[in-house]
Image (cartoon, grey):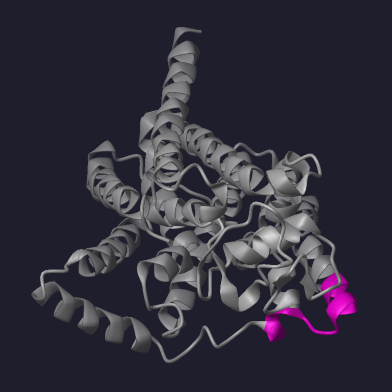
Amino acid sequence: MLERIRGNTSVVAAVAITAVLYGAVIAGRLAYHNWDPAFFIVAGHAFCDESSTPLGLTIFTRYGYDGLFYYRLALDPLTNERIEYGITIDNPAYRQQRILYPVLARIAALGANSWVPWSMIMVNYLAVCGLAFSAARFAELFAMPAIYGLVIPFFPGVLLGLDRDLADPLAISLMVFSLYLLHSRRITFAACMLALAVLTRETVILLAAALFLHSGWRALRRQSSWTESVRLAIPLAAYAAWQLWIFARWGIFPAAAASGSVLGFPLDAAGILLIEALHSALGLHPFLLVELLFLGAMVLLAAIVFIRSAVDPGVKLAWLLYLALAAFLSRAVWVEDWVFMRGCEELIVLGFMIVIGVRARRLMPIVIAPTLAIWLALAARTRIAQ
């Protein structure tokens, strides 16, 4: 009983730390920009007609960022119009596949368009707090202090997603929660949460596929029942159904509608960026190099402990798939930390979970210290950045 109380206290502490620090980031960013929540959206003149945009949408830049399209979908999630509310969706089929975040923002705004900029921030803030809870509980499953789970919500990609009203924090939160449920053997609930994650960020489908394939392999070897595989097919079915709905709406599958090429020769673009980062470091701007070295170190650490980790083998298979994907990412991704930190998000988060699964407490400071250091540096920088 006493041990359970201590565990609950540790989880509450982990969530409280996350809530306070992320709350401070949000408050600081809002205060610096006159408490204008539209700054998080990063709207751009290229896709907005200022004379027709909703009241309260401030346009700061020329081109804007992806948060503008989530905002547009939050105003009308099931839209079949490319231009509405004075905002043009650059690639409707591609954007609409990440539907859950704008739907939740719409619900949280109670249907009021003027509240949507605030509700988008709120949904992501609550998602990050939920991520802290799931990560802390996951750490406890492997007899690790709950506080060690904080390495996951403080991965810099989560912060960058929140800073620009993107779907990443919600997707990662749902993904980690589903894996916590999976390791707790609540398979149906885990599959449903993973389906929601897939509808938030389509790249989570690699994890869903890996878990399904491993479960099917175990069923073929009579190590588990086929009912588990059927339940783990729920995310795949949800993904397929939503892709078909988008095809019926726009006449094109989202995968085919992806703007620009995100794949290239293995490590080609990452190598070019590393060379540029080295040059930047010589010019007394070393942070980009630090970020790249951080990603490389976290991948290497996960690879070193890969075999010894007690996480589900399906998670390990997914990590390998995301590693291959990262190797093939093109120059469109390996261009700045706003992109590559988020592009490697599943890879690094699953790597953190693999490290936690080793149950070696001496390893965690090696992971937590640089993660928190980079998070703090980015939190200070993005307070004023667009």
Left or right of residue 297: residue 128: right
Q: Going by the picture, which residue comes out furthest to the front?
A: 51
Looking at the figure, which quarter contains the C terminus? bottom left
Left or right of residue 228: residue 337: left
Q: Which percent across, then down, holds residue 334? A: 38, 78
Residue for point 64% across, 75% down: 47
Q: Which percent across, then down, holds residue 226? A: 78, 55
**Magenta stretch: dominant SS?**
helix
Whether residue 356 is situated above or below residue 45 in the rendered picture: above
Q: Which percent across, then down, holds residue 289? A: 21, 69
Task: Name which quarter of the figure residue 349 lies in.
Answer: bottom left
Residues 278 and 344: in front is 278
Task: Name which quarter of the figure residue 204 lies in.
Answer: bottom right
Whether residue 66 is situated above or below residue 259 in the rendered picture: above
Residues 123 and 354: in front is 123
Residue 210 seen in this snapshot: no
Q: In this figure, what is the number of numbered marks?
A: 0
Q: What stretch is highlighted in magenta?
A: 244-257
Residue for point 64% across, 82% down: 258
Whether residue 285 is situated above or below residue 231 in the rendered picture: below
Residue 147 is one of the magenta-drawn residues = no
Whether residue 12 is situated above or below residue 373 in the rendered picture: above
Q: Going by the picture, which residue comes out furthest to the right?
A: 248
Residue 256 is one of the magenta-drawn residues = yes
Q: Going by the picture, which residue comes out furthest to the bottom?
A: 265
Q: Which percent across, then down, holds residue 228? A: 75, 51
Residue 59 seen in this snapshot: yes
Q: Going by the picture, which residue comes out furthest to the top?
A: 2
